[in-house]
Image (cartoon, grey):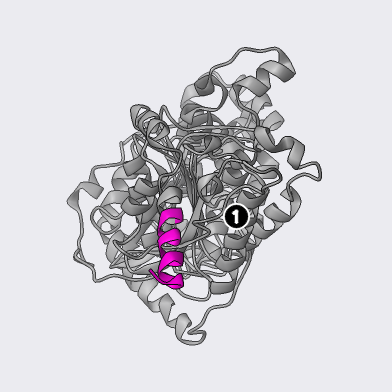
Amino acid sequence: MGHMEKAVEELKARRKEALAMGGPERIERQHRQGKMTVRERIDFLLDSGTFQEYGLLASHVHHRPGDKITPADGLVTGFGKIDGRTVALLAEDFTVLGGSVSTTNMHKRMRMFDLAVQECVPLVSLLDGAGARAQMLGDMAEGLPIVAHFIKMAKVSGIAPLIGAILGPCAGESSLEASLLEFTVMVKATGMLAAGGPPVVLASLGMTVGKEELGGWRVHCEIAGGADNPAEDDREALLTLKRYLSYMPTNAYQYPPSIKPEDDPDRRDEELLSILPESYKRPYDMKKIIHSVVDRDSFFEIKPLFAPMMITGLARLNGHSVGIVANQPLVYSGAITAKAAQKQRHFIDLCNAYHVPLVFLVDVPGVMTGPESERQGALRSGLAVAYALTWADVPKFTVVIRKAFGFGGSAMCGYMGGQTLTLAWPTVDFASLPVDSAIEAAHGAELAASADPEALRKKLETEYRKFSGAYPAAADFNIDDVIDPRETRPRLIRALEASLNRRSASPTPSLRHGVMP
């Protein structure tokens, strides 16, 4: 055997050792917990045969003879394709020292951040790691380059989609990385997200807490908003990432991909005539309207469990990618809370960064009021939405379904919001205040002195409604048209396709901004 043949044989042996990850016992443990291994996840996510690995033979920094090799140093990185489009990828390997971070591991991460920016491709993070490597703290006296790491990561945002899945107990550095992502999926039961895991909480606070209570999927998908969408298992999480990317461009220098539509652009669903209850105070499910208006089976909701009074998600109209922002009357009558505004602001920034047109479906009584809402900062968060709308330079479309009161209506891209089209259903009610609130404020003394306050209230309400409905708004040209609800889909599609002509003036769009967490 010649010199090169021997070298190649050694290379094969080293590759085989690296591909074995943490060994059979740790792989079996991963499977017992219902988790895929890091390489199984990559094979499932990427198009077959497309993965080109960077750093397969990396290991921790050696300081002593006999130091054990850490295969790929607990982090698999490289490039591959998802549905034919190139992505950069980093995936933590929990079978190698819990997927923990060392200096080599960190350098691999930072290399992928640099390459994602340089090559303008999405960066996908598959997170299943325990933070800084305790076994090497003595060898990392100077510390990991955490600040530089997050600066590099933040610079990916807005250049190319920055997404990931929380697939295991992510603490420390991994949890911080997850919090910077533009879109995250979290696996139920196995996923955890916490600045410090249960052992750290016990040591620092003397509290014994389980990982679900500390940072499980309900904490982050329902309460804190630290993760966007829950998933039942690894496979569902990875499929969710793939679906999200299907609505997004490869980078901010491209427009979102359109697909050949399979739905009739002129479809007019009869059920839209019966969705709204006769009473203005009775709720209904806005998602029924969304599903009737967008292409069949195209609505992909983002943050479905967090601040559910605000609905955000991606969809298609005649094959074109759009973002949907809608009030949900089933929760707080659709009022905008602080959390709802934070959710809305982030989504508007996301769509603007990647040139995704925005459709607003409005039924809002206003910004949530009351002492608790004021303490949560609903007004300030609502103004952050207005700020985001001001800088959103994508085509926007507003359809007022039932009511749009006060600043809440403005935050839902109301009058003079730079829309291409503003429509209203004939049942809408516009005003600075809801009619009943306006009557109480303006006629409180008359009502108190009246012999029949209820009759007076009804009379005043009838008079006020003459000036607050769809037709007064149309007469003042504050809206472009009043429509039959069944016309919503075709009217939006025609306006959207007219607005897309602006892309011919800038066939290569420019970078706008990152997406702040």
Q: Position of residue 283 (x, y in %)?
A: 37, 33
Q: Is residue 311 above or below residue 114?
A: above
> Of the residues shown, which amino acid type is indicated by label 1?
Arg
Task: Say how many tags the image has.
Answer: 1
Residue 358 shows in the view: no
Q: Position of residue 212 (x, y in %)?
A: 50, 22
Range of residues picked out in magenta: 1-14
> In the current view of this chain or complex, which residue is farthest to the right?
142
Residue 24 visible (yes or no): yes
The residue at the far bottom in this view is: 505
Is label 1 in a helix, a strand or a loop? helix
Q: Nearer the viewer, residue 12 or 269?
A: 12
Q: Quadrant of residue 368?
A: top right
User: Between 12 and 362, which is closer to the camera in this rendering?
Assistant: 12
Q: Main secondary structure of the magenta part?
A: helix
The residue depicted at 64 percent of the width and 51 percent of the height is: 104
The residue singled out by tag 1 in the image is 109
Judging depth in this view, the residue of 444 and 23 nearest the camera is 23
In this rendering, position of residue 205 left or right of residue 274: right
| Up-down relation of residue 447 to residue 243 (above or below) | above
**Residue 218, position as x, y percentages in the image:** 47, 27
Q: Residues within 10 Å of mark 1 (few under 14, many from 20)?
A: many
Instruction: Tell me the residue at 51%/82% (across/down).
Output: 508
Let me know if residue 220 is in the magenta part.
no
- In the image, what residue occupies the spot 62% across and 41% down? 67
Q: Position of residue 452 (x, y in %)?
A: 50, 20
Position of 184 compared to 410: left or right?
A: left
Q: Nearer the viewer, residue 277 or 156?
A: 156
The reply, left or right, for residue 100 in relation to residue 183 is right
Q: Is residue 277 above or below residue 429?
A: above
Quarter of the image that includes the N terminus: bottom left
As drawn, the residue found furthest toward the front would be 1
